[in-house]
Amino acid sequence: MKLFDPTSRAVERAVEVARRPARLAGLRLGLVDNTKFNSDTLLRKLAERLARRHGMTVTITNRKRSPSHEIDEAGIRALRTQADLVVSGIGD
C-alpha cells in the first residue's frame, strides 16, 4: 500500500520587522480591513481608542478583497506614504 503525504515543509524566509515608534502621540494610522466578520468593527473601535488616548488619526483604510488576498502594490505604497503605523484587523 502506498500512502500519499500531502504535507510540505514551511518555506523559510527572512522577515524584516518594522521599528516600533517611540511614541504614539499624533501618529497617522492606516487600517487594513481583511473582510472577516467584525474586522471593521474591531478596527473602528481600536482607532477610536487610539484617537482618544494618543491623538492618532486614521489617514487611510484599505479593504482587502478577501482574507486570503494580499494588498496590491498600490495599496502598500499608499499605506507607506500616508500612515506612520498600520493595523490589520482580524475579526471573527
Image (tube, rainbow, N blue to C red):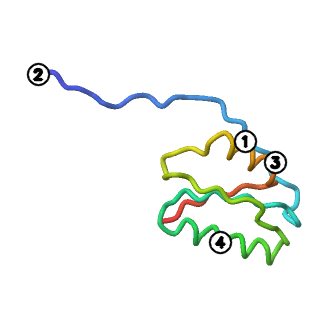
Q: Nearer the viewer, residue 15 or 71?
A: 71
For the residues carrying marks 1 and 4, which lies nearer the camera in this image? 4
Residue at the spot x=55%, y=60% of the render? 90
Residue furthest front as drawn: 74
Q: Amino acid at mark 1?
A: Val
Label 3 close to label 4 by CB (< 8 Å): no
Q: Position of residue 61 (x, y in %)?
A: 68, 59
Q: Give the vertical position of 80 relative to 31 (above or below).
A: above
Pointer 3 residue: 81
Q: Secondary structure at mark 1?
A: loop
Pointer 1 residue: 17
**How far apart are labels 1 and 2 at the CA level?**
46 Å
Q: Position of residue 63 (x, y in %)?
A: 59, 57
For the residues carrying marks 3 and 4, which lies nearer the camera in this image? 3
For the residues carrying marks 3 and 2, which lies nearer the camera in this image? 3
Mark 2 burial class by Cα count in 10 Å: few <14, some 14-19, many 20+: few
Pointer 2 residue: 1
Q: Amino acid at mark 4?
A: Arg
**How far apart are labels 1 and 3 at the CA level?**
18 Å
Tell me, for residue 44, which label it has, or none.
Answer: 4
Q: Secondary structure at mark 3?
A: helix
Q: Earlier in the sequence, mark 1 or mark 2?
A: 2
